[in-house]
Amino acid sequence: LIQTDGKTPHRVMIVEDEAIVQVHLSREVESLGYEVVGVAASAREAVALANREQPDLILMDIKLRGEADGIEAAIQIGQTCDASVVFLTAYADENTVKRTEKVGALGYIVKPYSRNEVRAVLATAVSVRRHLREAVQKGPPAPRSRASSAGGPFHGMIGQDARMQAVNRYN
């Protein structure tokens, strides 16, 4: 299984309103080494399930049962859950894609999808999620001072001209 911390597999939640796609996608995801922690068919179910299960990743269809869609569900989930979202949908019109960009999704697959597309987007989402967490743990990079670059590989090459030194005084 694909690991989050070396011990447990990545936990994936599936939000899809078509039962046959739910079953097929659950099997695909599990066969790729992920743990499916639950399936929801509506935005309301998705929010409740995400809050209860706290998944690492969510495969989210956009058109769902009920009034709210998958984009609205992702926004609500993002307020209480640290899950990364990958949209899996038949809709790729410009307006829909723009709406998903505002959510900060880690991927977007247009149906019909292949096993390779699901594998690639999940692997990419896992990698991006890991890199983001590492960056947050490290904190912001220390500011570079002019003194810290003294003696570096470009020492004596840049800024030695009197005109460049005058420019650098204003930076």
Image: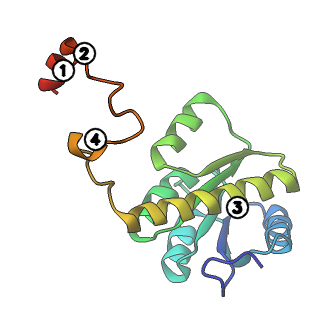
Q: Is residue 65 visible?
A: no
Type of the residue with mark 2: Asp
* Element on which disc 2 rests: loop
Residue 100 location in percent, x, y? Answer: 54, 44
Give the Cα separation between the discs numbered 3 and 1. 61 Å
Sequence-first disc among 3 and 1: 3
Which residue is identified by label 4?
150
Give the Cα separation between the discs numbered 3 and 4. 57 Å
* Element on which disc 3 rests: loop
Sequence-first disc among 3 and 4: 3
* Residue found 81% across the figure and 50% down from its top: 117
Which residue is identified by label 1?
165
Give the Cα separation between the discs numbered 1 and 2. 6 Å
Which residue is identified by label 2?
161
Task: Answer few, some or many: residues within 10 Å of disc 4's Cα (few below 14, many 20 plus, some between 14 and 19).
Answer: few
Q: Do labels 3 and 4 touch, CB within 8 Å?
A: no
Task: Answer few, some or many: residues within 10 Å of disc 3's Cα (few below 14, many 20 plus, some between 14 and 19).
Answer: many
Residue 62 location in percent, x, y? Answer: 62, 50
Give the Cα separation between the discs numbered 4 and 1. 14 Å
